[in-house]
Image: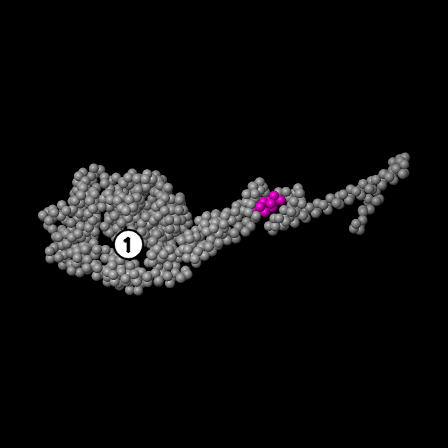
């Protein structure tokens, strides 16, 4: 059949004529049916053409929609009317157009009304991210960096939840990159605090961690802390001009040390030279100046000053064991009487300030001078309800110290004091200078016994056993008591948390990269404050805090890398336990939070003793608990003029003074740090002067 012709069967169709029908009538009837058939065929043909046209238009609109040409797609869907789901797709396109133009409220309403149609839920989430991103970009243009960080990081979270939907991945990366670019710009403009905050928020994105450290060092320079700045610059030598700035900062300190030496300010000069380490001839300068100062102070009887100079240079000046010619028996007898008088005063004095005792002529125990000496010590108020009983002492070691018969004696002495609450056993290890002269032995002590004083911050000062074991009052009623701890040779701060359920272990949320500084850990948990926690694996010495050492339980998860030391573990009843735990034994004991370091200081009311307890004078951190449940959080500053540092025995004794029944040492040295109510409470010896990266911390809930 030729195209365009009418089928032949239409023209040949004839009705059979009924009998007797009129021929004219039959012809008319045939014509009618022919016309009707033709009409029906044409109608069918037109209907098929119309349906094919609608389908083509629908598919064109679908293509435009997939290409994101919402305006053209909307026009097509509008023409299609009620065809298929064109009306809902028209609403979809108009919602997308509203979002693209910034009318996010109209878009939200439309996508919400569409429910689960097409990918409306993803589009609703996608444009939620776009709205948050726009807010972040506006905040960034207005230099409101805090708001910009919050918004753009929230937008990134939204985009990440959408995986590969549309351009979510690219937009998320762009949100981070615009923060990074602004941080780099601020760094170039020397706006270091603002740049540091942005790099901190960026965490490990590209080289943000290194540039944050660079900003930290620049801020330290602006504060005049050039040595700390040099240490930070040295940790990132390949970043910008960090290596050159480290050398420049050290040279500045070196020149200051030389000027101080020329001006006769030897203590400060020695400290600066000592901190410079191997830079130029700093080490030899410090040793020689300290040697001169030690000899000068020994000759003048300033034993405490001589000990300061010795501590400032550490092991650089060698102390030798005494020879056989030294009369050790005479020294033991003399120091035993000295310790008797000292401990008697410590046990009975409440309000007196004794401090350094000066020099003591050699005295016969029980003689007139001995009685006068004890009368001199017993000045001030007495606790008449106490009864003192001296138990004797042991001379641990005697070392040659300088020249002309000077020695350094380490003496452990013990006593018991009966108080209303029962007997208290006191053990102190003293470091005492001895000068053996023709007139006899002369001694000087670096211990003190301050009680019930108040420092310049208005906090109580505690340096001995709490009177009758009572804590200072909680003046502001917040359940937190802060006191300063002072001893000869070191200062520290104690936070007492009355409700132990407020103390918990917190971490960075992941392990394998860097840890977090204490301030950031506190902010991560919206906590009140805290102290550093356990040790960490530090193979390259960089102090990344990436992997905690020993058992760690934070956020309800248990980790165990390289078993180490003793654990400080709180159980579900908020009781502090000290001991070695594994993941299995901790679960059996219902431990909720745990970090590890050590050594143990007090276990179930029994103090730990041993030669290792007197090792090392360093910054220290410890945690303990009293019988009433109060948690004791202690930091001791070290390696500084105002505070040389403490031994494990020293912090054990502080915990005993505060009535701890369980206590353990946490990571010390440059990790020692305390943060409370938005500020650092101690003077850390870390390179930054604030906090190093930590794998965990003990924190205090608000």
Up/down of 471 relative to 696, above or below? above
Residue 225: image location, x then y, percent: 33, 56
Image check: 554 left or right of 132?
left
The local secondary structure at tag 1 comes to loop
Image check: 285 left or right of 524?
left
- The segment highlighted magenta reads 89-99
Is residue 571 within the magenta segment?
Answer: no
What residue do we see at 35% from left, 52% from top? 690
Image check: 520 left or right of 401?
right
Residue 342: image location, x then y, percent: 17, 47
Q: Is residue 683 visible?
A: yes
What residue do we see at 52% from left, 47% from top? 131
Report which quarter residue 211 is drawn in.
bottom left
Q: Is residue 402 visible?
A: no
Task: Please name the residue that numbered disc 1 is placed on.
Answer: 640
What residue do we see at 24% from left, 40% from top? 469
Residue 324: image location, x then y, percent: 15, 58
């Amino acid at each position: 059949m030729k195209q365009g012709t009418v089928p032949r069967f239409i023209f040949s169709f004839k009705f059979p004529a009924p009998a007797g029908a009129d021929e004219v009538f039959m012809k008319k009837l045939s014509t009618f049916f022919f016309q009707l058939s033709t009409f029906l065929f044409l109608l069918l043909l037109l209907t098929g053409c119309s349906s094919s046209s609608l389908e083509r238009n629908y598919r064109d609109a679908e293509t435009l929609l997939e290409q994101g040409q919402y305006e053209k797609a909307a026009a097509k869907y509008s023409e299609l009317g009620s065809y298929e789901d064109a009306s809902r797709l028209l609403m979809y396109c108009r919602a997308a157009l509203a979002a693209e133009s910034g009318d996010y409220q109209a878009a939200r309403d439309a996508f919400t009304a569409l429910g689960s149609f097409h990918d409306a839920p993803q589009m609703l989430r996608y444009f939620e991210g776009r709205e948050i991103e726009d807010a972040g970009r506006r905040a960034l243009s207005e230099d409101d960096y805090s708001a910009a960080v919050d918004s753009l990081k929230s937008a990134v979270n939204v985009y990440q939840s959408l995986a590969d939907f549309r351009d979510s991945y690219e937009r998320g990366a762009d949100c981070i990159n615009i923060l990074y670019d602004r941080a780099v710009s601020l760094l170039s403009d020397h706006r270091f605090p603002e740049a540091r905050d942005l790099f901190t928020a960026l965490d490990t994105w590209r080289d943000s961690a290194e540039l944050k450290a660079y900003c930290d060092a620049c801020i330290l320079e602006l504060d005049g802390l050039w040595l700390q700045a040099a240490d930070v610059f040295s940790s990132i030598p390949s970043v910008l001009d960090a290596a050159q700035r480290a050398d420049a900062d050290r040279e500045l300190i070196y020149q200051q040390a030389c000027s101080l030496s020329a001006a006769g300010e030897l203590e400060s000069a020695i400290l600066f030279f000592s901190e410079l380490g191997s830079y130029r001839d700093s080490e030899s300068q410090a040793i020689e100046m300290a040697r001169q100062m030690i000899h000068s102070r020994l000759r003048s009887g300033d034993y405490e000053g001589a000990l300061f100079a010795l501590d400032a240079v550490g092991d650089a000046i060698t102390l030798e064991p005494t020879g056989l010619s030294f009369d050790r028996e005479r020294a033991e007898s003399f120091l035993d009487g000295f310790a008797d008088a000292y401990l008697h005063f410590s046990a009975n004095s409440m309000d007196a300030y004794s401090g350094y005792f000066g020099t003591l002529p050699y005295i016969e125990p029980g003689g007139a001078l001995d009685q006068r000496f004890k009368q001199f010590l017993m000045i001030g108020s007495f606790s008449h309800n106490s009864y003192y009983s001296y138990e004797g002492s042991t001379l641990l070691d005697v070392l040659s110290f300088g020249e002309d018969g000077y020695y350094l004696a380490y003496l452990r002495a013990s006593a018991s004091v009966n108080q209303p609450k029962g007997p208290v056993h006191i053990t102190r290890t003293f470091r005492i200078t001895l000068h053996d002269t023709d007139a006899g032995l002369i001694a000087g002590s670096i211990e003190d016994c301050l009680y019930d004083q108040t420092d310049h911050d208005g906090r109580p000062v505690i340096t001995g056993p709490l009177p009758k074991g009572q804590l200072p009052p909680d003046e502001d009623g917040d359940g937190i008591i802060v006191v300063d701890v002072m001893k000869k040779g070191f200062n520290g701060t104690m936070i007492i948390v009355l409700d132990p359920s407020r103390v918990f272990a917190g971490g960075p949320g992941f392990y394998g990269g860097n840890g977090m500084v204490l301030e950031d850990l506190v902010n991560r948990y919206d906590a009140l404050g805290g102290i550093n926690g356990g040790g960490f694996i530090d193979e390259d010495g960089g102090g990344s805090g990436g992997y905690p050492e020993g058992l760690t339980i934070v956020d309800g998860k248990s980790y165990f890398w390289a078993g180490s030391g003793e654990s400080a573990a709180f159980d579900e009843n908020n009781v502090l336990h000290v001991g070695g735990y594994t993941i299995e034994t901790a679960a059996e004991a219902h431990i909720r939070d745990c970090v590890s370091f050590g050594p143990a200081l007090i276990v179930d009311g029994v103090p730990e003793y041993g030669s290792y307890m007197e090792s090392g004078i360093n910054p220290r951190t410890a945690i303990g608990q009293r019988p009433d449940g109060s948690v004791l959080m202690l930091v001791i500053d070290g390696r500084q003029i105002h505070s040389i540092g403490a031994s494990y025995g020293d912090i054990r004794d502080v915990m005993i003074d505060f009535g701890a029944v369980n206590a353990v040492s946490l990571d010390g040295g440059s990790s020692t740090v305390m943060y409370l109510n938005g500020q650092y409470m101690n003077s850390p010896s870390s390179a930054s002067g604030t906090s190093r990266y930590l794998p965990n911390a003990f924190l205090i809930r608000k």
